[in-house]
Image (tube, rainbow, N blue to C red):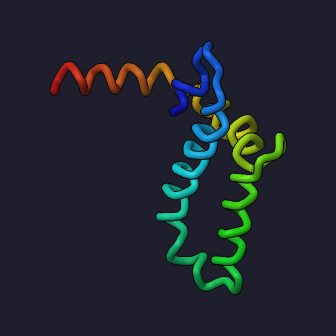
Amino acid sequence: SIKAIESSSKEDDTMWLTYWVVYGVFCVAESFSDLFLYWFPFYYAGKCLFLVWCMAPVPWNGSQVLYHSVIRPCFLKHHEAVDNMMSNISTKA
């Protein structure tokens, strides 16, 4: 999904691809922290509001904000190492 977002051909699917990338990162982070976070009152209500903010059809929605400020810089910093690792795995397979 990140490769599709960063490609030169931009279409309407960029907004939803951005959402799914942010949602995937959120799910991975939540799988580690869920043991502690569910004890907080209104955790699930806050989680629901966060996901609605990420889906909101406005230019400043959560997916765009989080992708451009957190996920994209991290991806651009490490994408060559990830591509090399994936090519090594595919040649071994």
Above or below: residue 15 compared with residue 77 = below
Please give left or right for residue 32 compared with residue 91 in the image: right
State the residue lying farthest toward the left: 93
> Which is more toward the observer, 80 or 22?
22
Above or below: residue 61 compared with residue 53 = above
Q: Which residue is drawn at 58% across and 17% down?
A: 7
User: Residue 28 location, x and y as percent?
Assistant: 49, 55
Quadrant in the rendering for residue 29: bottom right
User: Residue 68 location, x and y as percent?
Assistant: 73, 35
Please give left or right for residue 58 compared with residue 37 in the image: right
> Which is more toward the observer, 54 or 57?
57
Please give left or right for residue 92 compared with residue 56 in the image: left
Q: Residue at x 67, y 37 (%)?
A: 15
Q: Residue at x 54, y 68 (%)?
A: 33
Above or below: residue 77 compared with residue 20 = above
Q: Which residue is drawn at 70% across and 82% down?
A: 42
